[in-house]
């Protein structure tokens, strides 16, 4: 019994660590996704504002 308890504790620790890693990966992917969307928005904004002055408002649409 003590043997199986030790293994279940190790499994628990392993699961917690892998969950933490996957959460960190999710955060990283969310940040990367946000950066990509920001770049796309910025490119679209530049395309729309090309003929206007740099101070022109580029509304999100």
Image (cartoon, rainbow, N blue to C red):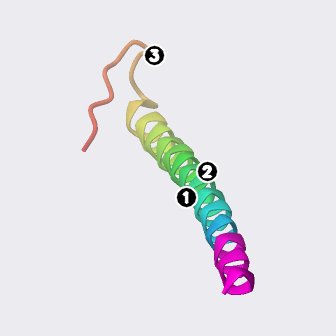
The disc at residue 28 is: 2
The disc at residue 55 is: none
**Mark 2 residue element:** helix
Q: Point out the tag, 3 or 1, that comes first from the N-terminus.
A: 1
**Is residue 49 found left or right of 26 in the rendered image?**
left
**Gap between marks 1 and 2 measured at Cα:** 5 Å
**Viewer-side residue, 49 vs 38:** 38
Query: Measured from the top left, where is residue 52 in percent x and y?
Result: 39, 22
Q: Nearer the viewer, mark 3 or mark 1?
A: 1
Q: Which residue is mark 3?
A: 54
| Dominant secondary structure (helix, strand or loop) of the stretch shown in magenta | helix
Q: Looking at the image, which residue is at 39% across and 12% down?
A: 55
Q: What is the magenta range?
A: 1-11
Residues packed near mark 2 inside 10 Å, few (<14), some (14 to 19) or many (20 plus): few
Query: Measured from the top left, where is residue 41 in percent x and y?
Result: 43, 43
Query: Measured from the top left, where is residue 2 in percent x and y?
Result: 70, 80
Q: Looking at the image, which residue is at 55% across and 44% down?
A: 35
Quarter where residue 49 is shown? top left
Q: Looking at the image, which residue is at 51% across and 52% down?
A: 30
């Amino acid at each position: 019994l003590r043997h199986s308890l030790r293994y279940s504790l190790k499994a628990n620790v392993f699961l917690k660590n892998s969950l933490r890693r996957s959460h960190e990966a999710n955060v990283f992917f969310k940040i990367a996704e946000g950066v990509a969307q920001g770049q796309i928005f910025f490119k679209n904004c530049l395309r729309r504002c090309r003929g206007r002055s740099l101070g022109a408002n580029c509304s999100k649409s």
